[in-house]
Amino acid sequence: MDKLEALWAREQIRDILHRYCKGIDRRDWELVRSCFADDHIHNHGDITGSPEDFIRMASGLLEAIPATHHSISNVHFEFSADGSSVETEANFVAYHLIEAGHPEGMPVETNGEATDWIVAGRYCDRFEKREGEWIIVRRNAFHDWERHDPARV
């Protein structure tokens, strides 16, 4: 893989990571699904399974959360020798606004108040180039820290 090919691959991969964040924040589950291969394995919190398993969990969790904002930064790339796959590590910060009266403990304690829930961590992904396009074939998501505080709404 020459330098120009590597730069183009990096941009395509960043686009997929950003598409994932947009899909989650817009509740566009087809857009989220488009980021993952059919044989993808997703490890995120208590979920280990297919893209559909992850989407079922995420859509259920976010159904009653009116606002989220997912951001990606510091994407690190390690390409295979032949350039057909790449391991990435991308930092993320995910903000969630939980409304007053939300069910307690789902996902954090709120004491009945509007709550800001912030999660920061890493998406450790394996991408493969299939039929000329990059796609995520494995995700391990790690929550490095999180906090929840009363929201100022």
Image: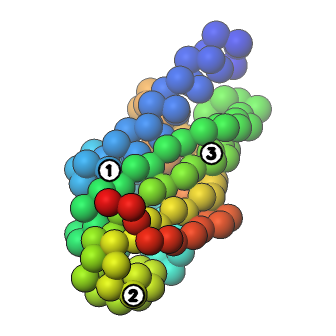
Residue at the spot 63% in from the left edge and 48% down from the top edge:
91
Q: Position of residue 38 (x, y in %)?
A: 37, 55
- Above or below — where is 25 with respect to 58? above
What's the mark number on residue 25?
Answer: 1
Residue at 49 percent of width and 44 percent of height = 71
Residue 112: give x, y in percent of width and height.
Answer: 32, 85
Q: Which mark is first along the chain, 2 or 1?
A: 1
Which residue is depicted at the point 40% across and 71% down? 115
Q: Nearer the viewer, mark 1 or mark 2?
A: 2
Query: Outermost residue, front direction?
Result: 152
User: Residue 74's x, y, as percent?
Assistant: 67, 38
From the viewer's side, name the closer residue of 51 and 32: 32
- Disc number for residue 111: 2
The answer to which of 141 and 152 lies nearer the viewer is 152
Q: Disc 1 residue type?
A: Asp
- Residue that label 3 marks: 90
Tell me the CA gap for discs 3 and 1.
17 Å
